[in-house]
Amino acid sequence: MNKSDTIRDTAALIGRIGVGAVFVAHGWQKVSEWGMDGTAAAFEGMGIPAPALSAWFAALVELIGGTLLIVGAGLPFVGVLLAIPVLGALFLVHLPNGLLGEGGYELVLVLAVSAIALGFNGGRFSVDHLIRGKRSEPARI
């Protein structure tokens, strides 16, 4: 592993930790602060379809998926899975409010694209790399 590989992989690890922590915090907020009934009621008020099911889906994906993103396990599946609830929030809730300002979609957009990018480019400092070893490295020409 050369120096630029180490820097790239360290940057991916830092990104996974930061983005994963935000997902975990949002999932934990749904479960512990609002409670699942409160989250479902909030989702219903925002017009989200199947609010109880959507609340559980979002909370579990954010908690479990965020944790898996941090440790780098199940990539890229986890990255795509994490993007689903935030893209739903973008299109169903935030889009009419514009990019910036109260209720804007800047955060959910950044979370969705970051989850996908890190899911497909999680770096070597990950559980996936430990399991797959050298087979997961791209071929060098």
Image (spheres, grey):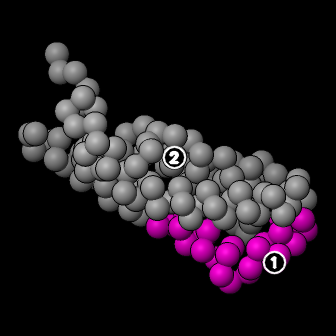
Callout 1 environment at 10 Å: few (<14), some (14 to 19), or many (20+)? some
Q: In which quarter of the image is residue 134?
A: top left
* Labels 2 & 1 near each other (Cβ < 8 A): no
Q: Name the residue under label 1.
A: 38
In the rendered image, residue 35 lying in the magenta stretch gets the answer yes
Can see residue 84?
yes
Question: Type of residue at label 2?
Answer: Val
Q: Which residue lies furthest to the top in this view?
A: 141
Residue at horizontal 69 percent and vertical 59 percent from the top: 58
Q: Which residue lies furthest to the front in this view?
A: 131
Locate residue 46, reporting x and y percent. Answer: 87, 64
Q: Residue furthest left?
A: 2
Locate residue 82, reporting x and y percent. Answer: 58, 50
**Extent of the magenta region:** 19-46
Q: Mark 2 points at which residue?
A: 78
For this rendering, which residue is in front, 131 or 36? 131
| Horizontal side of residue 35 vs 6, given as left or right | right
Q: Is residue 5 above or below residue 46?
A: above
Locate residue 40, reporting x and y percent. Answer: 83, 69
Residue at horizontal 10 percent and vertical 44 percent from the top: 3
Q: What element carries label 1?
A: helix
